[in-house]
Image (spheres, rainbow, N blue to C red):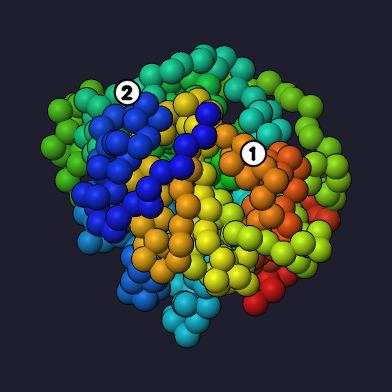
Amino acid sequence: MSRTLPAPEFGREAAERWVGEHLAGLFAGDPVGSERFRGGQSFADAALDAYDVTGYAARRNQVWPPSRRGASALSPYIRHGLITLPAAWRHVAGGPAKDVGKFRDELLWQEFARHWYARLGTRTRRGVRRELAAAAPTDVGVDGWDRTMVCLDETVGELERDGWLVNQTRMWLSSQWSVRSGWRWQDGEDAFFRELLDGSRAANRLGWQWTTGVGSSKHYGFSRWQVEKRTSGWCTTCPRRHDCPIERWPDDPAFTPVERPAAVKQGPGAGDLTGPTSVESDGSAPKAVWLTAESLGTDDPAAAAHPDLPIVFVFDRPLLERLRLSAKRLVFLTEILAEWAQQRDVEVHVGRPADVLADRPVAVTHAPVPGFGRLADRILPAETHPWPWLALPGHGSFASFSAWRRSVQVVI
């Protein structure tokens, strides 16, 4: 059953109360937001305006102390469309060439992940090259990492508090989970997805496949050497420093072959999710703009095309009941909607999106994910706007990032 909810009010405490009252039972933990990140277009704009790419190439993999980090921390806003990849690309123009080149390369990895997921969809639930032979299932979530080690305790603590990690520590945790502990990478990816504000099946799943070696030519081996190189003081203060479980490089895991999806090398076919290249309309006039979690920014193409129409957002109850996301993620989304409510009429619902949107002519921006495709096929939007790609999807190979990069061209 679907319910219409009051529009959330602006502010962290208001958002936490709103989530606790209206989304009770649909999240894990207490209704508390990220200690570091606030949701909303104004916070995204401020983060982008403040970001200086200088030093990125040298410091992007630094972990501790935070003052040494070069990571942009823009990913929560990029994930939900408050900052588009083209906007981030343009922002660093004029910076030091080496730093701009490396930062833009990372943006292209994000775009590669979206193309990869749009091409392969739910087939990415399995390794696209091979699988770990002895992987064991587990549902321990964040409790699966050995927090007697400072490196894992600090990293998992940041994940729990902030809902964010630098890329280096994401690789540490995923390698520790699957390469050393021998657990199913899919369960670790789910644990990340529940906690990360930037959690997406595209980037998150590609990262796990690359790190564990099931989607790449080799795996990443987490060891003490990386911790000592990327942090200051962690190993010297660690209670496990004299019996460090990651002292040496891990043994190579055993892999089993899988039947590689044909779409890895072939161009888009049935089930491709890249969407239209121009606005598609059934000829009727939209009465509202439907925003999805993929595209919540004020530059959302459908919202920008219809500035006088109300905004509709639906918290998908069956999906949330299954995922049991951290409350941080729902507070972050609620803060975004609260900012929208200061500018436009906003309708917020909880229930089955197809029930809420049935027989209602809406304009929407295409989202290159399977859930959007299934839902759009049911509700038949009056108007569908193209996704704002950084590089238009093509017909090239996804066998590697470099192969894909040669097949696409940045469009801005």
**Quadrant showing the C terminus:** bottom right
Residue picked out by circle 2: 143
Residue at horizontal 72 percent and vertical 64 percent from the top: 285
Callout 2 amino acid = Asp
Q: Say which of marks 1 and 2 sits in front.
A: 1
**Which element type, helix, strand or loop, lies under badge 1?**
helix
**Which element type, helix, strand or loop, lies under badge 2?**
helix
Instruction: Choose top left, top right, bottom left or bottom right for residue 249.
Output: top left
Callout 1 amino acid = Ala
Indicate which disc residue 34 carries.
none
Query: CA–CA distance between discs 1 and 2?
Result: 35 Å
Position of residue 201 measured from the top left corner of the image (x, y, whole percent):
57, 41
Instruction: Choose top left, top right, bottom left or bottom right for residue 37.
Output: bottom left
> Mark 1 touching mark 2, by CB under 8 A?
no
10 Å crowding of disc 2: few (<14), some (14-19), many (20+): few
Judge by depth and name the residue closer to the eye, 190 or 290: 290
Confirm whether residue 338 shows in the render.
yes
Q: Residue 146, relative to residue 104: is it above or below?
A: above
Indicate which disc residue 354 carries.
1
Count of numbered marks:
2
Position of residue 54 measured from the top left corner of the image (x, y, whole percent):
37, 75
Residue at horizontal 83 percent and vertical 49 percent from the top: 268
Q: Residue 23, relative to residue 187: is it above or below?
A: below
